[in-house]
Image (spheres, rainbow, N blue to C red):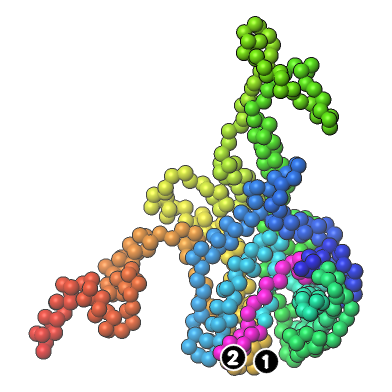
Amino acid sequence: MALIRALLDKSVPGLDEAFGGRDVASEEMRIAINSWIAEYFNRTPDKDSDPCQRLPYTIVHKLEKGMFAEYDSDLQDKESAKGSWMSENLTQLDLAKSTAMQWMLIAGEAWLKPVPFQQDGRTFFRPQVIRRNQAVVMGRDPDGRLTSIGTIEQTAQGGSWYTLVESRTVDAAGFLQMHNKLYRSSGAHLLGAPCALDSLSRYAGLSESWVYPKPVGSVGLVPLRTPMANCVDGSLEAVSIYEPAMGLIHNINRNEAQLGREFELGQHRIMAPAEMLRTGDHGERKLDDQVFVGLQEFRAQGGIGLTAFSPTLRHESYEARKQSYLKSVENVIGMKRGLLSDVQEVEKTAYEIASTAGDYNLSLIDLQRVWFDAVREYLTLCDTLGRMYHYCDDTSWDAREQLSISWGNGVLYDPDKNWSEILQMVQSEMLKPEIALAWKYDLPWETPKDLEAIREKYMPELTDMLREAGVRSS
């Protein structure tokens, strides 16, 4: 939406008045935020730059995929009424995890907003991802947490554009105050004139101003911030994961444009004396076709003639260049080697896999901790709001006790190593062999009948022994 994109560049008049405040980010930060997002979407070459490598996308995509490669989340209690309600909220959150983390990596900061929705006669929360360029941050505490923020939401209906302007402010006691205003205009780039909230049915139940009946303790949005110090202006604003490499990315794009020109100019060329060139109707210099008549005879007589040449080009693989670029980005940002680039050219041995797994894990752990903390805070916020509006019961619920998140071994899944560890547990009589086989072949094992079926198929000798023992005992 045009109006949403204009939040940080201040190109739409009236937004500050609608929100009741200005964004606290400096002009330098606003320019930086817009440049990160523009670079992420940049795909059109110009005279001096060619973004064909799409490095911002590659950086964000590789980090997000690495984070969630073996991700799994669960709750200890999913059977009780409160547990099943919280489990559905977690399921909805996991559906948005990739989008949320990608926008955090792109713009430095994003927020998760719990939005109520109906399902099977119950009300749950679905997260809405709010990007940094979709919000006006009007206040932060000394730790950088929001104390006041404004967001907008646009709807096109009946030939008009409706813009909901929402502002949130939390006081020292933790009470959250909300303000809503609806505007109607003729285009997406205009704020328009105020209108009643019930002009759209979806906002008919909203109040223009209200305070939550109980303390929320925040603005009701869960932050996602890159774990990096601000290297733009030193403020409390978060920075893009690729901000330290922005200069390098620009130079790489210029390098790609230069390489493209070299290949274009490296086509078969003809050298000719200047007096053989003629000026065309539009001032261009060109050869007359007649100069090629009898060229071989002319050369045989020792004439100068025309000399064809093709200059030697730099032969460098596109993929090799990309890997070199990614290694440079890793160095500039301070990432572990191999997180973005491919560090090996041959298949690793099992020993090498085991010895390098820890290195890879360390390179992602800071980002994984950001998501883990956000999940805890989001579920706690869902519990607070759910109890406040009676979407769930008042049973006490602690995310620190209930939430379980597994990241695997960081990046690389080694099934042979896992199976070897399970066999060691069987040999040590810590695990039944039937359960080990059930894990390997994805079979049910919860009941005695399930275990008997596994023995029948995979352990016939043991089955015969048990039957004989049963006969003797009878």
Few, some or many residues within 10 Å of mark 2 (<14, 14–19, 20+): few
- The answer to whether any part of residue 429 appears in the image is no
Look at the image and say whether residue 126 sits in the magenta stretch: yes
Q: Is 339 left, or right, of 49 in this rendering? A: left
In terms of image quadrants, where is residue 148?
bottom right
Residue mark closest to the camera, 2 vs 1: 2
Query: Which residue corresponds to mark 1?
Result: 389
Residue at 52% across, 86% down: 84
The secondary structure that dominates the magenta segment is strand
Query: Which residue corresponds to mark 2?
Result: 122
Image label count? 2
Say what secondary structure mark 1 lies in. Answer: loop
Front in this rendered view, residue 447 or 424 = 447
Residue type at mark 2 is Arg
Residue at 68% across, 91% down: 388
Q: Give the percent coordinates (x, y) of residue 304.
A: 69, 11
Q: Which residues are magenta?
A: 116-136
